[in-house]
Image (cartoon, grey):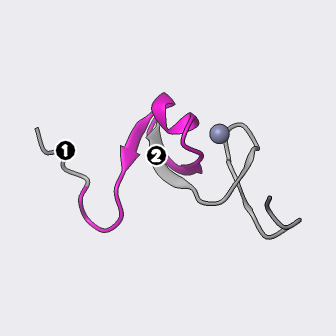
Amino acid sequence: MYQDGAGMECNLCGREVPFLNKADIEGSIIDVCDRCVSYGVKVLDRQMLAQPV
Ligand SMILES: [Zn+2]
């Protein structure tokens, strides 16, 4: 259970989650939940934007 107001809200679906991922969605870096991160490209913290293939 998450405390009211203590959780983080997904900027895409609005779901309250314990933590968020940063995702590049249509050129914008937004905080999204684990489900919504699949709609874009997951961005890792720091300068790891280059995708290791
Ligand atoms: Zn979401």
- Is 41 a magenta residue? yes
**Residue 2 picture location, percent across and down:** 79, 62
Residue 10: x and y in percent read 68, 48
Q: What stretch is highlighted in magenta?
A: 26-48
- For the point 36% across and 64% down, the residue is 45
Q: Is residue 41 left or right of residue 11?
A: left
How many marks the image carries: the answer is 2
Q: Which amino acid does label 2 sit on?
A: Ala
Q: Is residue 45 left or right of residue 4?
A: left
Tell me which residue sits at (50%, 29%) in the image: 39
Instruction: Using residue 32 as the reference point, say whether residue 22 is left or right of it.
Output: left
Kind of element beneath mark 1: loop
Q: Name the residue under label 1.
A: 51
Q: Which quarter of the picture shows residue 14?
A: top right
Near mark 1 (Cα within 10 A), the count class, few <14, some 14-19 or many ≥20, is: few
Residue furthest top in the image: 39
Where residue 30 appears, x then y in whole percent? 55, 50
In this rendering, the answer to whether 15 lies above or below 6 is above
Image-quarter location of ligand 1: top right
Q: Distance between the residues labelled 1 and 2?
A: 13 Å
Residue 27: quarter of image: top left
Q: Residue furthest right?
A: 4
Q: What residue type is labelled 1?
A: Gln
**Foreground: 41 or 6?**
6
Residue that carries the numbered disc 2 in the rendered image: 23
Work out which quarter of the rendered image holds the C terminus and state it: top left
Identify the residue at the far front of this view: 1
Is the Cβ of the residue at disc 1 closer than 8 Å to that at disc 2?
Answer: no
Residue beneath the point at 79% across and 70% down: 6
Q: Which is nearer the N-term, disc 1 or disc 2?
A: 2
For this rendering, which residue is in front, 50 or 15? 15
Quadrant of res 44? bottom left
